[in-house]
Image (cartoon, rainbow, N blue to C red):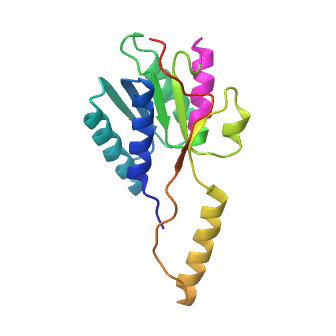
Amino acid sequence: MWTDDATAVTEAVRYLAALGHRRVARVGGAASFGHTVIRTAAFDAAARSLGLAGAWQVATDFSGEAGARATRSLLTSVPADRPTAIVYDNDIMAVAGLSVAAEMGLRVPADVSLLAWDDSQLCRLTHPTLSVMSHDVHGFGADVARTLFGVLTQEGPGSHTVPTPVLTPRGSTAPPSV
């Protein structure tokens, strides 16, 4: 089972560029994961096609600690050189990034826009609420279980795609103030 991560990443980068962001970063996962490879390539292609002035990618282990470290590293640059928007490959890292921005005295979304992946309840409990590439995580898990059972019993469809994540703008994204 898989999602069309390339289309979703491209939509996220286009959305941020449409808001006026020219320096966009992505905090992703380890390159050993297939979806990370797809997202990395799609991010690079989208940034290149939109002529973004800066596009950074940082690989992590998907943990909150790694997301916080990556965010701190990205945001300690000189203001004119740091990203004005960051896309995270999961909501845990995005919540950690939101905390780091606050710790550094940066306002979200006035100083930096943040966009998460997944859309768990965490994204709706933060302040501001996190903009996301949303998909039904619980539905996906149930579909995985049904598909696995079908493969084991030889009665299921086997490999198939699931719905592409959908952009859900919320309070953490806005045009850059810089």
Placement of the C terminus among the 4 image quadrants: top left
Q: Residue furthest front?
A: 18
- Residue 63 visible in this rendered orientation of the protein: no
> Picture coordinates of residue 160 (x, y %)?
46, 72
> Picture coordinates of residue 114 (x, y %)?
53, 29
Is residue 143 one of those drawn in magenta?
no
92 in relation to 7, above or below: above
5 in relation to 160, above or below: above
Q: Residue furthest right?
A: 125
Q: Main secondary structure of the magenta part?
A: helix
> Residue at coordinates 51% horizontally, 64% vertically from top-left?
162
Quarter-of-image position of residue 121 = top right
- Bounds of the magenta segment: 93-107
Q: Which is more toward the observer, 169 or 87?
A: 169
Quarter-of-image position of residue 97 = top right
152 sits left or right of 33 in the view: right
> Picture coordinates of residue 93 (x, y %)?
56, 36
148 sits left or right of 2 in the view: right
76 sits left or right of 55 in the view: right
Is residue 105 one of those drawn in magenta?
yes
> Residue at coordinates 57% horizontally, 89% vertically from top-left?
153
> Picture coordinates of residue 86 (x, y %)?
47, 30
- Residue 80 visible in this rendered orientation of the protein: yes
